[in-house]
Each structure stands twice: as C-alpha cells, then as structure tokens.
Image (cartoon, rainbow, N blue to C red):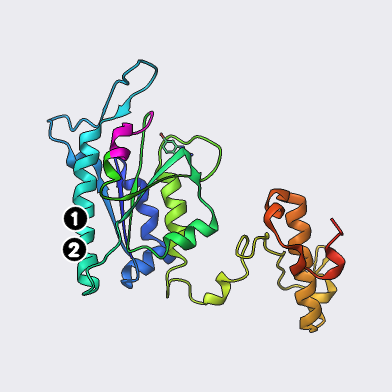
Amino acid sequence: MRIDVVSIFPEYLAPLELSLIGKARQDGLLDLRVHDLRDFTTDRHRTVDDTPYGGGAGMVMKPEPWAQALTAVAAEGSGDAAGAGDSGDARKPVLIVPSPAGERFTQATAHQLAEEDQLVFACGRYEGIDERVLEWAADHFTVRPMSLGDYVLNGGEVAVLAMVEAIGRLLPGVVGNPESLVEESHSDGLLEYPVYTKPSSWRDRDVPAVLLSGNHGKIAQWRRHEQYRRTAERRPDLLAGFDAGTLPRADRTAF
Ligand SMILES: Nc1nc2cc(Br)ccc2s1
C-alpha cells in the first residue's frame, strides 16, 4: 500500500517513522510519503491561505496549491499501481480529508481502507480547505471526509496519525502475531475483555480465579461475558446492532 500525506506541518507526521509503522516502512510493507503543501505554491511567500468569502473569523486554505499537490501525488501513485500489476485496473486513490464534518472513522473503516492501493490524506488547517477542492478531486479520487469523533482539533495531522496507525497495523506482516488483531475492541462489535498478568495477587487484588483454572471453555465464556458487560456499561450504543444470540445464554437478558 502507498500512503501520501499532504500538510503544511510535515514534521507533525514524524511519529510515523517510529515503532511498528516505522518498521513496516523500512521493511517495504508500507510506502508512506509526507509532502509539504507549501512546495506546491508559486508565490514568493508560499501562501496557502486567504480570507473567507462571506466574511467570518480565520482563514481558508487556497484551492490551487491543493490541486497541484493532489495531482502530483495521484500521478506518482498511479505509476506505482500500474507497476504493481499488468491488469492496469488500479482503483482510484482514496482522498481522506480529516474533518469534524466527516463520516465516522471506525475499526470497520480501517479494515476497508487497508484494502486500498493508495490513500492520500489532506491535512486541513485554519478554518478548513476551500470546498471546491473536494468537488474537483472527485474526478480523480474517491473523496471521503472523515471524523475521529465529535471534537475540534487545530488541524488534520493528529487525526492522520491515528488513522494511519489504525490502518497500517492491519496490513499483512506489520503486526508480529496476526492473532492479536482478532480479539480487539470493536473487532466483533464489542469492547475487549480485561487482561491480567503476573503476579496473580497484587496489592491485595487477585486475578479472577477462572483465568488460573486452565479450563479454556470457562475462560472463553468469562471473557465473552466481560466483553458484553463492559460494552453495556461503557458503550451501550454499540449494542444496538449486536446479535445477543452469540452470547452465553445467561448473558442474553442479564443487562
Ligand atoms: N476533529 C478534527 N478537527 C479538525 C480541525 C481541522 Br482545522 C482540520 C481537521 C480536523 S479533524
């Protein structure tokens, strides 16, 4: 997979050189490139913003630098994709625009995006990007404004760090033990169960006895119960679409 990130603060994306994602890049499992939007300006001041039509506070990101940057990264990516296979049927790259006004990014979204050939992340700043950029981009990209939650940041970079990690860790070979991707929060519609390690008694708090029993059937049942209990307590909204029939019988009406 190829990922391009366009930002006026490319150094914000430096954490993507570390840890699992950094190693995936070194191992050639992920081709991630960060671009400075100002490199696509043409004036001596490398201007990327201007005042909003209709008035109001703050500044809006100018359209032309974005069009230049997105055209460049799409062209680079299509060259890679064409090289990847003789079919030449590379899909349009996906343009992900972090925004409080976007669709909700979930674990399901991460799995879906991990299947794409190229992702391009456009990091807005100020009051946002001129809307005509997203309209224009629809001819060249699948455009997806994306929200991590109902709060406002100062720019899209922090959201991109989170999404790239959530997507990158799903790529083949990135996580050492793929099994660890299976029992995670949201992987089966529920929150994950609590985990424990040595010592079995710590500051007068004991590990649940079932986990020391060696009875794998009971352990699996206890873990499922805990997933459901936690989800009912912390995220009842997730239970709306959940099939309780997959629960141990005693749990089906317990909450
Ligand atoms: N939650 C989010 N807030 C923001 C703010 C700006 Br400015 C750009 C992107 C995002 S995503």
Q: Residue furthest top?
A: 55
Q: Quadrant of residue 211?
A: bottom right
Which label is found at residue 79? 2
Q: Give the percent coordinates (x, y) of residue 28.
A: 31, 71
Q: Amino acid at mark 2?
A: Gly
Say which residue appears at 18% left-offset and 33% top-offset: 46
Q: Amino acid at mark 1?
A: Ala
Q: Which residues are magenta?
A: 127-135
Q: Residue furthest bottom?
A: 214
Determine whether the residue tagged by mark 1 lies in a helix, strand or loop: helix
Return the residue at label 1: 75
189 displayed left or right of 174: right
Q: Compared to 139, does 115 lie above or below?
A: below
Q: Can residue 132 be found in the magenta stretch?
A: yes
Which label is found at residue 226? none
Q: Compared to 248, does 141 lie above or below?
A: above
Do the numbered discs 2 and 1 sit on residues whose CB atoms are within 8 Å? yes
115 displayed left or right of 78: right
Q: Can residue 56 be found in the magenta stretch?
A: no
Q: CA distance from mark 2 to mark 1?
A: 6 Å
Q: Give the percent coordinates (x, y) of residue 20.
A: 43, 66
209 displayed left or right of 63: right
Q: Nearer the viewer, residue 86 or 20?
A: 86
Where does the N terminus fall, quadrant-wise?
Answer: bottom left
Q: Quadrant of residue 80?
A: bottom left
Ligand 1's image quarter is top left
